[in-house]
Amino acid sequence: MKNPFYMKDIITITDFGRAELEYLFRVADNIIEDPLRFSDILKGKILGYAFFEPSTRTKLSFESAMKRLGGQTVGFSEPSKTSIKKGESFKDTLKMLEVYSDVIVVRHPADGAAKYAAEVCNKPIINGGDGKFQHPTQTMLDLYTIYRELGHIDGLVIGILGDLKYARTVNSLLLGLTNFKPKKLYLISPPLLRPREFILDFLSSSNISFELIERLGDVISELDVLYVVRIQKERFPDIMEYNKVKGAYRVSMRTLMDAKDSLKILHPLPKLDEIAPEIDNTKYALYYKQAQYGVFVRMALLLSILLEEVQ
Ligand code: CP
């Protein structure tokens, strides 16, 4: 297959189908198999990053990925230390990164910021998370983690637990899963945190079998994968609404009493109190390895965006 990512913007996961995602998985597999083969391949290329919101994984894993490919990085994660502080616009800031780099990762609190960045920039833009809208590269690594660890995504029973309304990782994951054929999706949340209608409509029109439920315990014994997200306090328009759902769910060893031995728990991280620390070192926890796969998937993506011939 011809490289489908060459010089492409990565704004929403719906821009990519199963064939494109599987292409990326193959590149990531090749990198894991022989990382030294790729260690110099982006020499002379520069990744720019503009982070208007805090990040540990997305920023550092993109930096690590670029450096492991022999490239370099420039950018900022504290806008207050740039000329934005003097009133410079988002557009002009991005136009400068366009001059200084070959591909740019943008994280921003506003839905649609990455799309706007792609409209004003002539270099490929990667959405590193925009508001409560999307986080497409998180979904690429989430799907890769499932594929790599369980061997397939089709046929699995997947539970998604938590703030399904405001978590952009969940939006992107649900949309991305429509490229595959999971046996069933259980969307588990308090009623206030159910996914938004456009996501449910998309699942229905993609013939995905799903059910909205409130209690993890009702389905835990069926699950192959449990994907957990924290409550996104920073996205709530009203703190009173947040207070109604604060602490509404927590996964502990007790919760997992009836789980399959092979159950795997994913989390995009950061995690707060929704997963008990006692789970971290068990066979169920896949979230730290998931973050590690994030580096390989982002290496695969950077390579594929910047080089026409990859594999
Ligand atoms: N998963 C994720 O986006 O983490 P960060 O917010 O730390 O980048």
Image (cartoon, grey):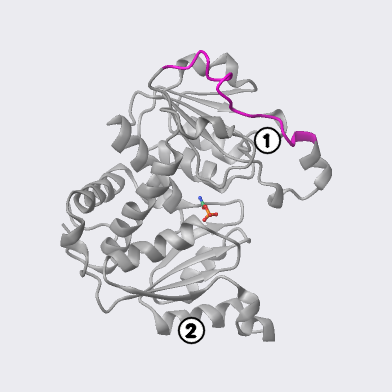
What span is colored magenta in the figure?
Answer: 244-260
Residue 135 in sight in this render: yes
Q: Residues within 10 Å of mark 1 (few under 14, many from 20)?
A: many
> Is the CB atom of the residue marked by disc 2 within 8 angstroms of ligand 1's nearest atom?
no
Q: Amino acid at mark 2?
A: Met
Q: Residues within 10 Å of mark 2 (few under 14, many from 20)?
A: few
Residue 9 in sight in this render: no
The residue labelled by disc 2 is 96
The residue labelled by disc 1 is 193
Q: Nearer the viewer, residue 94 or 258?
A: 258
User: In the image as oriented, which residue stretches furthest toward the right?
Assistant: 240
Do the residues bearing badges 1 and 2 touch, measured as CB atoms within 8 Å? Answer: no
Secondary structure found at label 1? helix
Q: Amino acid at mark 1?
A: Leu
Residue 112 in percent (x, y) is at 57, 60
- What label sits on residue 131 in the rendered view? none
Q: Nearer the viewer, residue 254 or 234?
A: 254
